[in-house]
C-alpha cells in the first residue's frame, strides 16, 4: 500500500490523453475503429469517444461515471472535464514525486480550487432580460449592475467560427434563407476549405487589439446582448448548428409572446430533430410543430387533410393486439374452452375491427403512437383518411397534449371524448422530398404548440451523429446560459484569471505567514502546520494543469504553431494581468471585447462583432468534478476484487510492483 | 440414472493459528482496515473484477460486504464486524483493527492462550467500567438543550470518510441537515405516543452538495412527463387529504394460481373481468371520498383514468422501501385486497411538487407524525453513495444518544487515554486481584502491555502520511507531530492541539511517543478536566455506545480466534 508512481493516476493520464484534439472551437475529428465489427465511426465529442474506450478497470469505471454524471447534468463541458482529469493527474503525480503527503495534496488542492472558483465570480457577466427577437434588441437596453463587459457596438468584436474539421470535407455552407432577419448573407457553396486556408483567416487576436480601451474601467452601463448575439457568443465554432438553435428559441419565444428570453421557455423537451439524409446542409432549418418522415402511402391522406383542422388521439403505448402496459404479466395458466369447434376469425382480425371501430367513432384523423402499431391497422386507417404516426417521442406527445387538450391513453378502450384533442393541422413539406423519394415529410401543427422541429440535413452519413451531438451541445449551452443567467468571458479568460489568482495566493504565502485561515483540516494534525512548506508547490502544480489546458486550446485554435509559443503568450498575458491594478478589469477589457478573433469571409461584418462566452456552472462543475476524480483516485491505495474466478478477493497494491494478495 | 459419489472425509487442521498463511492474511486484513481509518484514511476500490460496479469507499460495511474470505478465522472476524456495524453503524474499522492487532500481539506472548483470553477479558471489564464511571475523563455528557455536541459528533462522523469529498463548509452544512432531521423526529414530551420518527434519505446525483436539504414528509419520485398526466383537472387536493395505500398490484393481471390451470369459457375475457373488478374498487374509493391512492406496484391505466376523472390522485410504482414509512406517516394500513375497509385509510396534510436537480418529486406532508426526508446531492454516484452511508451512520449515532447520552473524545484521544489509564492501573495492582485471576504479576503485566499497545496501535492508524504520534504525560491524549520529531526535544512548535481539539499546547507539558515504553502515569480524572469539557467547542467526538460495543466485539472475537484449536472443513 505504497504510493510511489500511483498506477491509478497514470491510467487517468493515459485515458485522457486521447481527447487533446477536441479542445476548443476547432476540433479535429477522430475515426473510431472497432476491431471486432470492422466498423468505424466519426466523432469529435469526448462523450462519444468515451463510449468507445475500454473502461473496464476500476479507475476507468470511476472516470466513466464522472463524465456520464456531468454529461447528464449539463451536456456540455465534458471535454474540459476529460482533459483536466489528465493534466491534474499529472500535476498530482508530480506532487507525489516531490514527497508531498497525500492528505495535504487533497486538502490544499480542493481549498485552492474553491478559492479560484470564488475569485472568478468577479468575471460573471449577468444576463437579464435578453431580448428574444432582434427587433427588440435596440430597445432592450437595460441597466445591468456589476462589471459586465459586453458592448455590442464595439468594433473589435468578432466571431470565432470554425469551418469544419481538419478532415476537409464540406461542412459549413451558410444558408441565407434559414434566418429571416439576415437577408444580406450571400450564399457561398462549394467551399471545400483546406486547413491552410483556415489558418490564413486569423487576422485579429488579443495582442493585435486596439489598446485604446485597455485603460478604461469596467462599464457599469451595458446593454444585454440580444438572443442572436448570445447564441453567436456561445457557438464556439458551431455557428451553423447554433443558428438553428437560435431560430428554434426565437420561434418558441414568439409562440409564447415573450419579449425576453426566459429559462422556462427554452427547454430541450421543446425540441425535436428530424433528419434528412442526402440533402445539402444548407437546407437545415427549424419550424414550429412536429415534422416527421412517413412512407409515400401517406401522401394522399396528408393532401386530403391539408387546409382543415382535425382531431388527434395520443397513444402512450403500442397500437398492437399483444401490447400490455408495463408491469402486466399475462397469465400463462389460462386455457380457453370453447363450445364451438372453430372460430370464424382469428383474434387479431377481431381486435383490428374493434380497434378500427373505436378509432372511427372517436372521429380522429391523426393518431400519434409512442411505440409500434399493427401494420394492417395502419393501412385500414389510411383508407379511412386517418394518419397513424408511430415511434413518437414522449416529449412530442406531451407537447400535443398540452396544446390540444388531448390526454395520452394507453389502450384504445380508454378513448372517450375527454381525451381527444382538436385543432390540429397537417401539411406536406414538399421541399423536403428526399432525392430517392422513399419518404415524405409531414408537418403537424397545432395552435400554440410549444414544440419546434429542427430539420437537420446532411449529405455525409457519418456526420449525422456528429451533427446531432453538436445540436444538443449548442442547445444546452444556450439553455445553461439562460438558466444560470450569467456567462463567463470565453477564449481562456477564466483560466487565465485563475492562473493569476493562484499566483496571487502564492505571493501572499511569501509576504505574510497565514495565521490559521479558518479550519482547513477537520482535525488537528501535523499536516496543518507543515502545509506551509508544500503549499506553493501544490499551487504551482494546479496551475500547470490550467496552463496546459490553455496552451492546448491556443494550439488547437491555430493561433500558435508550437506549444512553446503558446506558453510564452500565456506567461506574457499573466505578466500583463499582474501589472494591471485589477485583474478582472484587465480580463474584461481584453477578453470580452477582443477575444481570439478569426475572420470569417462568409459572414457579413455585423457577425464579426461578438464576444465569445462560456457557460458558468458547467465549467466550474467540470473543474470540480475533474479534481474530485483525481483526488479520489489519489486517495485510493488498493483495489479489492470480490468474488473473482478463484472465489477469493484480491487486494492489489497500487504500487509499481503490481502485487496480488489472496485472502 | 443416478450416480453415487463417495463423500469425502472432513478435513481437520490442528492449531490453525500457527500457520503462517493465516497470520499473513490477518496482517493484510489489518493493513487494509487500518489504511482506511480516520479522516485521512485511504480509499479502497471494491469491485468484482468483471465490469461490475466499483465502490470507492473506506467504510467497513462496504469493504467487508462483498468480501469472500477463505479462512474460517477471517470469516469469523469479518462476520463479527459486519454484525456490529449492522447494529451500531459506527466503529467497525476500530473493532477490526483492534482485533487484528490484539491477535497478532497475543500470539507472540509467552503466556498460555487460555490465560491471555482471561486476562484480556478482565482488562476489557476494567476499560468498560472506567468508561461508564463518573470519573471517566474522556467522556462528555450530551446536553440536549444545546446543539453543540450533537453538531460536533455529526461533523466528526462526516469528516471521517474522505470519499464523500466534502469541504469543511459542506460538512457543516450536511451536519446541520442531519441534526435538524434528528431533532425533527424526536417526539415532543406532550405527544401521546412518544414514538421516534424516521428519516428517509433521498439521493440526487449531479447538483452540488450545497443543494441538499431536509424537508418534513415523504418524497416520491415522479418520472418525466408524468406530472401533467397525474394531476386531476381540479389540481392537487388541498387540506385534510384521505389516502389509501395499496400493497396489492392493481395492474389487472390474473392472480397467480400456482401450478393449476384455469379453464375459461370462450367469449369470456379474463382481463376484462379483472378490469371490471378494479373499476368497482375505484368506485368504492370515490364513494369513500379518498383523494389520493398510492400503490406499491402498478395501477392499470384504465383505473388510473377512472380515478383521475373523479379527481383522485393516483400514484403507482412506489416500491417496497417507502411503504412502511408512508404507512407510519399517514396512519394508513397497506391494503392487500380489492375491497378495502374504510378503517385502512390514512390522512395527509398537504401534497405539493418539488424538484431537485433534474428529478421531480411528489411531496407528501403529514399532520403530526415525525417522518422527514434528507435530500442528499453530490456530484457523482461514488461520492453520493459514500455520503449516504455516512449520513446514515451519523443519524444512527445520534439515535443512540437517546439511550446513552454520552460521547467519547475522538481523534485517537480516547484510545490513547484509556491505554494510559490501563497501564497505570495494571502497574499498581493489588496482589488479591492477581490471585483472583490466577496469574503472576509478570504475566499480567505482559498481557496488559499487549492490550494497551494494541489500543495505541489503533490510535496510531489515524496517521497515514508518515507523521509521528505523541502523547502528553498529563491527560494521555493523542497529538500529531511531523515525521522526524524527537519526543524529548523541544518540538512544541509543530503541535498545537490534541486529536480531539480539547487540549491546547502549553508550556511544561511532558511528551512521549505514543506506544513507546515509558513510566506509567495516572491521567487526570474527570473532575480536573470537567470545566474544560463543558466549555469546549468544535470537538472531535465519537459515539459512546458504538465504541464500547466495538471494544467488546474486538476483544471477544480476538478471544474466539485465539481459542481456535481445530478447523474442521467439510469438503462435500
Image (cartoon, coloured by chain):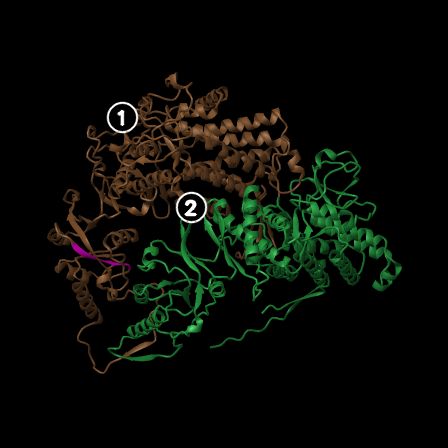
Chain colours: A brown, B green
Q: Which residue is mark 1?
A: A606
Q: Tell me the element at label 2.
A: helix
Mark-to-mark CA distance, 1 and 2: 38 Å
Most frequent secondary structure within the magenta stretch: strand
Query: Percent from the top left, x then y, of residue A197?
Result: 29, 24
From the viewer's perspective, is residue B72 above or below residue B164?
Answer: below
From the viewer's perspective, is residue B132 above or below residue A584?
Answer: below
Residue at 32% in and 45% down: A268
Judge whether residue A10 is colored magenta: no
Q: Which residue is mark 2?
A: A68
Query: Percent from the top left, x then y, of residue B39?
Result: 62, 45
Judge whether residue A313 is colored magenta: yes
Q: Tell me the element at label 1.
A: helix
Mark 2, chain letter? A
Res A414 quadrant in image:
bottom left
Please state which of residues B457 and A182 is positioned toward the viewer in this rendering. Answer: A182
Please state which of residues B287 and B465 is positioned toward the viewer in this rendering. Answer: B287
Res A337 quadrant in image:
bottom left
Magenta extent:
A310-316
Q: Name the outermost residue toward the bottom.
A: A339
Question: Seen in the image, is A521 located left or right of residue B313?
Answer: right
Res A313 quadrant in image:
bottom left
| Crowdedness near tag 1: few (<14), some (14–19) or many (≥20) residues, C-alpha within 10 Å | few
Q: Are marks 1 and 2 on the same chain?
A: yes
Amino acid at each position: 500500500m505504497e504510493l510511489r508512481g500511483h498506477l491509478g493516476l497514470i491510467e487517468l493520464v493515459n485515458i485522457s490523453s486521447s481527447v487533446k484534439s477536441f479542445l476548443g472551437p476547432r476540433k479535429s475529428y477522430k475515426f473510431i475503429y472497432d476491431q471486432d465489427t470492422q466498423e468505424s465511426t466519426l466523432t469529435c465529442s469526448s462523450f462519444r469517444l468515451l463510449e468507445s474506450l475500454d473502461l473496464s478497470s476500476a479507475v476507468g469505471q470511476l472516470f466513466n461515471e464522472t463524465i456520464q454524471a456531468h454529461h447528464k447534468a449539463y451536456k456540455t463541458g465534458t471535454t474540459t472535464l476529460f482533459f483536466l482529469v489528465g493534466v491534474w493527474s499529472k500535476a498530482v503525480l508530480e506532487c507525489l514525486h516531490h514527497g508531498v503527503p497525500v492528505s495535504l495534496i487533497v486538502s490544499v488542492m480542493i481549498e485552492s480550487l474553491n478559492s479560484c472558483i470564488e475569485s472568478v465570480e468577479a468575471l460573471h457577466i449577468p444576463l437579464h432580460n435578453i431580448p428574444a427577437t432582434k427587433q427588440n434588441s435596440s430597445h432592450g437596453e437595460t441597466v445591468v449592475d456589476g462589471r459586465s463587459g459586453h458592448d455590442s457596438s464595439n468594433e473589435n468584436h468578432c466571431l470565432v467560427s470554425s469551418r469544419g474539421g481538419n478532415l476537409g470535407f464540406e461542412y459549413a455552407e451558410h444558408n441565407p434563407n434559414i434566418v429571416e432577419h439576415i437577408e444580406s448573407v450571400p450564399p457561398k457553396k462549394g467551399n471545400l476549405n483546406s486547413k491552410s486556408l483556415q489558418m490564413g483567416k486569423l487576422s485579429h487576436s488579443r495582442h493585435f487589439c486596439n489598446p485604446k480601451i485597455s485603460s478604461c474601467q469596467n462599464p457599469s452601463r451595458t446593454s444585454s446582448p440580444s438572443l442572436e448575439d448570445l447564441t453567436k457568443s456561445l457557438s464556439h465554432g458551431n455557428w451553423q448548428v447554433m443558428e438553428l438553435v437560435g431560430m428554434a428559441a426565437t420561434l418558441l419565444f414568439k409562440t409564447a409572446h415573450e419579449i425576453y428570453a426566459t429559462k422556462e421557455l427554452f427547454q430541450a423537451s421543446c425540441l425535436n430533430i428530424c433528419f434528412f439524409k442526402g440533402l445539402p446542409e444548407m437546407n437545415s432549418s427549424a419550424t414550429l410543430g412536429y415534422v416527421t418522415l412517413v412512407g409515400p402511402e401517406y401522401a394522399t391522406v396528408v393532401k386530403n387533410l391539408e387546409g382543415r383542422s382535425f382531431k388527434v388521439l395520443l397513444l402512450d403505448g403500442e397500437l398492437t393486439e399483444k401490447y400490455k402496459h408495463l408491469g402486466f404479466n399475462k397469465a400463462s395458466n389460462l386455457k380457453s374452452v370453447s363450445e364451438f369447434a372453430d372460430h370464424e376469425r382469428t383474434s387479431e382480425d377481431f381486435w383490428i375491427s374493434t380497434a378500427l371501430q373505436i378509432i372511427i367513432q372517436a372521429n380522429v384523423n391523426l393518431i400519434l403512437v409512442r411505440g409500434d402499431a399493427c401494420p394492417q391497422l395502419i393501412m385500414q386507417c389510411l383508407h379511412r383518411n386517418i394518419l397513424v404516426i408511430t415511434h413518437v417521442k414522449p416529449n412530442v406527445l406531451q407537447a400535443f397534449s398540452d396544446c390540444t387538450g388531448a390526454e395520452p391513453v394507453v389502450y384504445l378502450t380508454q378513448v372517450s371524448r375527454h381525451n381527444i384533442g382538436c385543432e390540429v393541422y397537417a401539411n406536406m413539406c414538399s421541399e423536403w422530398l428526399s432525392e430517392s423519394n422513399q419518404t415524405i415529410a409531414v408537418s403537424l401543427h397545432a395552435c400554440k404548440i410549444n414544440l419546434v422541429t429542427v430539420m437537420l440535413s446532411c449529405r455525409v452519413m457519418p456526420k449525422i451523429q456528429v451533427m446531432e451531438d453538436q445540436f444538443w451541445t449548442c442547445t444546452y449551452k444556450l439553455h445553461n446560459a439562460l438558466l444560470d443567467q450569467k456567462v463567463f468571458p470565453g477564449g481562456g479568460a477564466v483560466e487565465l484569471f485563475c492562473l493569476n489568482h493562484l499566483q496571487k495566493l502564492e505571493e501572499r504565502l511569501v509576504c505574510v505567514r497565514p495565521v490559521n485561515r479558518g479550519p482547513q483540516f477537520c482535525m488537528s494534525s501535523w499536516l496543518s502546520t507543515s502545509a506551509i512548506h508544500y503549499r506553493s508547490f501544490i499551487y504551482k502544480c494546479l496551475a500547470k494543469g490550467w496552463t496546459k489546458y490553455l496552451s492546448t486550446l491556443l494550439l488547437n485554435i491555430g493561433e500558435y504553431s508550437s506549444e512553446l509559443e503558446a506558453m510564452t503568450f500565456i506567461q506574457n498575458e499573466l505578466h500583463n494581468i499582474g501589472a494591471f491594478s485589477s485583474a478582472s478589469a484587465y480580463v474584461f477589457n481584453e477578453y470580452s471585447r477582443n477575444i481570439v478573433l478569426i475572420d470569417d469571409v462568409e459572414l457579413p461584418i455585423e457577425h464579426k462583432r461578438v464576444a465569445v462566452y462560456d457557460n458558468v456552472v458547467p465549467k466550474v462543475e467540470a473543474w470540480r468534478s475533474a479534481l474530485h476524480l483525481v483526488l479520489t483516485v489519489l486517495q485510493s491505495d488498493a483495489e479489492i476484487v470480490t468474488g473473482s474466478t478463484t472465489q477469493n478477493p484480491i487486494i492489489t497494491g497500487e504500487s509499481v510492483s503490481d502485487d496480488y494478495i489472496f485472502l | 440414472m443416478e450416480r453415487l459419489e463417495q463423500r469425502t472425509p472432513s478435513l481437520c487442521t490442528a492449531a490453525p493459528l500457527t500457520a503462517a498463511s493465516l497470520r499473513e492474511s490477518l496482517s493484510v486484513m489489518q493493513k487494509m482496515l487500518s489504511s482506511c481509518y480516520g479522516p485521512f484514511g485511504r480509499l479502497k476500490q471494491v469491485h468484482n473484477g468483471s465490469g461490475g460496479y466499483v465502490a470507492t469507499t473506506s467504510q467497513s460495511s462496504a469493504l467487508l460486504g462483498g468480501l469472500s474470505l477463505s479462512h474460517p478465522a477471517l470469516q469469523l472476524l469479518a462476520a463479527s464486524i459486519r454484525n456490529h456495524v449492522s447494529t451500531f453503524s459506527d466503529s467497525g474499522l476500530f473493532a477490526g483493527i483492534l482485533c487484528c492487532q490484539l491477535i497478532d500481539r497475543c500470539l507472540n506472548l509467552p503466556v498460555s492462550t487460555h490465560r491471555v483470553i482471561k486476562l484480556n477479558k478482565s482488562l476489557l471489564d476494567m476499560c468498560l467500567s472506567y468508561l461508564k464511571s463518573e470519573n471517566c475523563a474522556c467522556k462528555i455528557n450530551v446536553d440536549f438543550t444545546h446543539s453543540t455536541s450533537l453538531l460536533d459528533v455529526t461533523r466528526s462522523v462526516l469528516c471521517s470518510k474522505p470519499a464523500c469529498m466534502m469541504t469543511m463548509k459542506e460538512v457543516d452544512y450536511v451536519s446541520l441537515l442531519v441534526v435538524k432531521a434528528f431533532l425533527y423526529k424526536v417526539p415532543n414530551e406532550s405527544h401521546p405516543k412518544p414514538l421516534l420518527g424516521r428519516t428517509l434519505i433521498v439521493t440526487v446525483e449531479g447538483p452540488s452538495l450545497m443543494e441538499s436539504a431536509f424537508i418534513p414528509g415523504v418524497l416520491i419520485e415522479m418520472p418525466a412527463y408524468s406530472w401533467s398526466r397525474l394531476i386531476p383537472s381540479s389540481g392537487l387536493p388541498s387540506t385534510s387529504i384521505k389516502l389509501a395505500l395499496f400493497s396489492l398490484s392493481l395492474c389487472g393481471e390474473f392472480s397467480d394460481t400456482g401450478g393449476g390451470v384455469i379453464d375459461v369459457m370462450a367469449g369470456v375475457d379474463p382481463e376484462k373481468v379483472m378490469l371490471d373488478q378494479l373499476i368497482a374498487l375505484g368506485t368504492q374509493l370515490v364513494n369513500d371520498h379518498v383523494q389520493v391512492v398510492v400503490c406499491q406496484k402498478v395501477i392499470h391505466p384504465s383505473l388510473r383514468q377512472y380515478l383521475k376523472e373523479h379527481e383522485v390522485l393516483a400514484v403507482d410504482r412506489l416500491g417496497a422501501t417507502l411503504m412502511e414509512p408512508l404507512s407510519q406517516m399517514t396512519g394508513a394500513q397497506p391494503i392487500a385486497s380489492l375491497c378495502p375497509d374504510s378503517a385502512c385509510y390514512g390522512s395527509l396534510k398537504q401534497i405539493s411538487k418539488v424538484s431537485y436537480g433534474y428529478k421531480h418529486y411528489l411531496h407528501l406532508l403529514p399532520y403530526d407524525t415525525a417522518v422527514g426526508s434528507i435530500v442528499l446531492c453530490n456530484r457523482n454516484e461514488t461520492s453520493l453513495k459514500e455520503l449516504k452511508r455516512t449520513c446514515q451512520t451519523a443519524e444512527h449515532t445520534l439515535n443512540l444518544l437517546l439511550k446513552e447520552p454520552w460521547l467519547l473524545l475522538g481523534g485517537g484521544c480516547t484510545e490513547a487515554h484509556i491505554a494510559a489509564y490501563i497501564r497505570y492501573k495494571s502497574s499498581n495492582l493489588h496482589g488479591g486481584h492477581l490471585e483472583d485471576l490466577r496469574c503472576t504479576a509478570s504475566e499480567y503485566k505482559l498481557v496488559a502491555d499487549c492490550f494497551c499497545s494494541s489500543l495505541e496501535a489503533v490510535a496510531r492508524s489515524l496517521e497515514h502520511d508518515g507523521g509521528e504520534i505523541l502523547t502528553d504525560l498529563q491527560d494521555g491524549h493523542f497529538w500529531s507531530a511531523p515525521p522526524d520529531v524527537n519526543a524529548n526535544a523541544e518540538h512544541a512548535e509543530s503541535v498545537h492541539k490534541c486529536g480531539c481539539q480539547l487540549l491546547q499546547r502549553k508550556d511544561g507539558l511532558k511528551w512521549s511517543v505514543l506506544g513507546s515504553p515509558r513510566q506509567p502515569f495516572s491521567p487526570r480524572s474527570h473532575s480536573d478536566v470537567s470545566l474544560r469539557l463543558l466549555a469546549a467547542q468544535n470537538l472531535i467526538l465519537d459515539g459512546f455506545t458504538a465504541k464500547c460495543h466495538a471494544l467488546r466485539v474486538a476483544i471477544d472475537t480476538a478471544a474466539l480466534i485465539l481459542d481456535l484449536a481445530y478447523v474442521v472443513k467439510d469438503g462435500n
